[in-house]
Image (cartoon, rainbow, N blue to C red):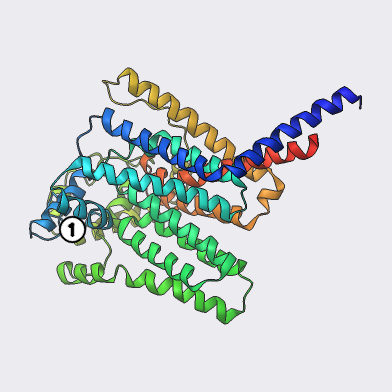
Amino acid sequence: MPEPAKAKLWGRGFRITSIFAWVEVHEKPLLALIVLVGVLLRFAAIATLAHQPESDELAYRAMALNWLSGQGIKDHMGNLAMYNAGYPIFILTPVFLLFPDNLFAVRFLQSLLGVICILLCHRIAAEVGAKAFGRLLAALLLGLYLPSAVYTVYLAKENLMTVLMLAAIYCLLCLIRTKSRGAAVSAGVCFGLLALTGNAALSLLLLLPYVLYCLRSGFFEKMRLAGLVLIPMLLVPTPWIVRNHLELGAPVLNTNGGFNLYLGNNPAATGMFVSISETPRGTSWAQLRQTGELNASQILKEDALTWIATNPSDFLKLAIKKLIYFWLPPFHQGGDQTSPLEMMVRVVWSLQFVVLVGGAVGSILNRSLRNHQGVRMLWLAIGSYTAVHMVFYVIFRYREPIMPILCILAALAVEQYLSERKAIYT
């Protein structure tokens, strides 16, 4: 190779090496800057989005306010356990206790939850082998991801679910590396809180067998660590389950399982959310509700299972359609009165989503990343969380808790690509 060409290639490698070295030295202030940018973006969303609670938000708000007023935990329709209790118990109730029915205070707290998610992305990236550049890029990608800022405004359980899912994954990664009892117990607590907050997140329990497989320990040591995960996972939601047994006559986490299963599996199901009024049960739903939320959910569950059993091919086709919908780029429009600002946000969101998915796929295409047990675990998390929604139905909001994992995988792919280019040039 001619000397000028060699010098040019060496110069590229030197620039990449210099950037990596500079980032390594300044990692802490850069991380602080990323957090600041993330906070400002979330505050900007709070300041500019004039949103009033609706739909599920009204239920969570009512659950917290009714509890504080001494009426017990029940939603705006009088249901005792139709909605998951974790978000109103751990987020809304403490805030409303200090700042009665103050939505700004809730949104401020949810901005802090967003900061925790950014920091967890940084730490998870470190656990799967990222250097300073990859760790910071993972944090930056989530810090700038628009839906994570926009949903700060909503009274949505996903704000808490995202933190708990990332914390559970981080604890399991630490467990592989350290075999620490503390990591095992912490993971169990996270799963217990997830059981109260969002049932779909319990699909991440599929990570536990993989973690045990990766541990370089004997059988009894693996079983001991598994027990340290499972015992707190079962203990944390126990008071709520006992309460439901006393109030409803059944030891359940919630009563929406059959309802959601039916919405996703009936003759009118599309793969996306459909109102029950648009299903065959629409005309009798009001009467069915009068029989009690537990009984109504059980009947809907039986309806759904009957439809699945009698239409197995349609069920499989619908499941595949849900898979496509779950990862469909958000090219949809908002309401009829979409503002120019909202249109711009949706365009940027779509671009971000495509870049993150493409970057994450890059981690599969790279052999060294593909063979990394931590990266495999992150993909298992994505796969298991996606699969559970293939059984029920899809709302774009439901995929937001798993998007930070795509940020991490995309950052790893970019860092690995640059590292390999550096090696070639030098």
Give the quarter of the image for residue 222: bottom right
**Is residue 115 positioned above or below 2 on the image?**
below
* Residue farthest along the top direction in this orientation: 340
Asked whether residue 55 appears in the rendered view, the answer is no
**Near-viewer residue (106 or 238):** 106
The spot of residue 121 in percent (x, y) is: 49, 48
Q: How many marks?
A: 1
Q: Which amino acid, by three-letter code, is at mark 1?
A: Glu
**Near-viewer residue (331 or 272):** 331
The spot of residue 346 in percent (x, y) is: 39, 26
Residue, disc 1: 293
Asked whether residue 174 appears in the rendered view, the answer is yes
* Residue farthest along the right direction in this orientation: 2
Q: Quadrant of the C terminus?
A: top right
The spot of residue 138 in percent (x, y) is: 53, 43
| Left or right of 236 on screen, residue 321 | right
The spot of residue 418 in percent (x, y) is: 69, 37
Q: Residue at x 47, y 45 (%)?
A: 404
Q: Quadrant of the N terminus?
A: top right
* Residue farthest along the bottom direction in this orientation: 220
Mark 1 residue element: helix
Q: Residue at x 8, y 59 (%)?
A: 71
Q: Residue at x 20, y 57 (%)?
A: 296
Q: Residue at x 18, y 70 (%)?
A: 249
**Near-viewer residue (112 or 167):** 112
**Near-viewer residue (268 or 232):** 232
Please tell me how crowded label 1 is: few (under 14), some (14-19), or many (20+) other residues with Cα within 10 Å. Answer: many
| Left or right of 66 on screen, residue 50 | right
